[in-house]
Amino acid sequence: MNDGAETVVDALLEVLGPAGTLVVPPFTDEMAIDPNFVFDSLNTPSLVGAIFEAARRWPGARRWP
């Protein structure tokens, strides 16, 4: 199933409803070890799994450094 992570995020958002907030930890710790690493909140991927990466890329998602 190629869209499994998106299906999970969609189901979570459906359960939460329009007033709910889905919060996930899109950690990038391994990348931060590189002294040349520059964090880009729009493009730096999450390193903790497909569901978290799908939530990060979800339309309307916000990410704070």
Image (cartoon, rainbow, N blue to C red):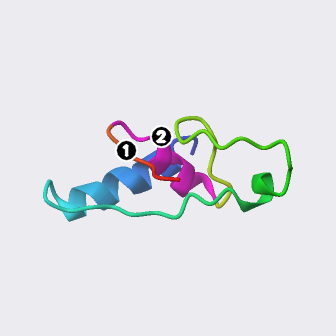
Viewer-nearest residue: 61 or 49: 61
Q: Farthest residue in the front direction?
A: 35
What residue is shown with label 1?
A: 61
- Crowding at mark 2 (Cα within 10 Å: few <14, some 14-19, many 20+): some
What residue is shown with label 2?
A: 57
- Is residue 12 placed above or below 63 in the rendered structure? below
Where residue 47 sits: x, y (%)?
68, 55
User: Image point 86% across, 49% down: which residue?
Assistant: 35
Where residue 50 sits: x, y (%)?
59, 52
Looking at the rendering, which quadrant does residue 20 occupy? bottom left
Q: Is mark 1 on a helix, strand or loop?
A: loop
Magenta stretch encompasses residue 50: yes
Where residue 43 sits: x, y (%)?
59, 35
- Residue type at tag 2: Arg
Viewer-nearest residue: 62 or 5: 62
Magenta part, dominant SS: helix
- Is residue 32 placed above or below 39 in the rendered structure? below
Tell whether 64 sits left or right of 19: right
The region drawn magenta spans: 49-59
Tell whether 3 sits left or right of 18: right
Viewer-nearest residue: 62 or 48: 62
- Crowding at mark 1 (Cα within 10 Å: few <14, some 14-19, many 20+): few
Tell whether 60 sits left or right of 31: left
Name the quadrant of the N terminus. Answer: top right
**What is the CA distance from the residue labelled 1 to the residue labelled 2?**
7 Å
User: Image point 38% across, 46% down: which residue?
Assistant: 62
Q: What element carries label 2?
A: helix
Tell whether 2 sits left or right of 63: right
Callout 1 touching callout 2 (CB < 8 Å): yes
Magenta stretch encompasses residue 26: no
- Residue type at tag 1: Ala
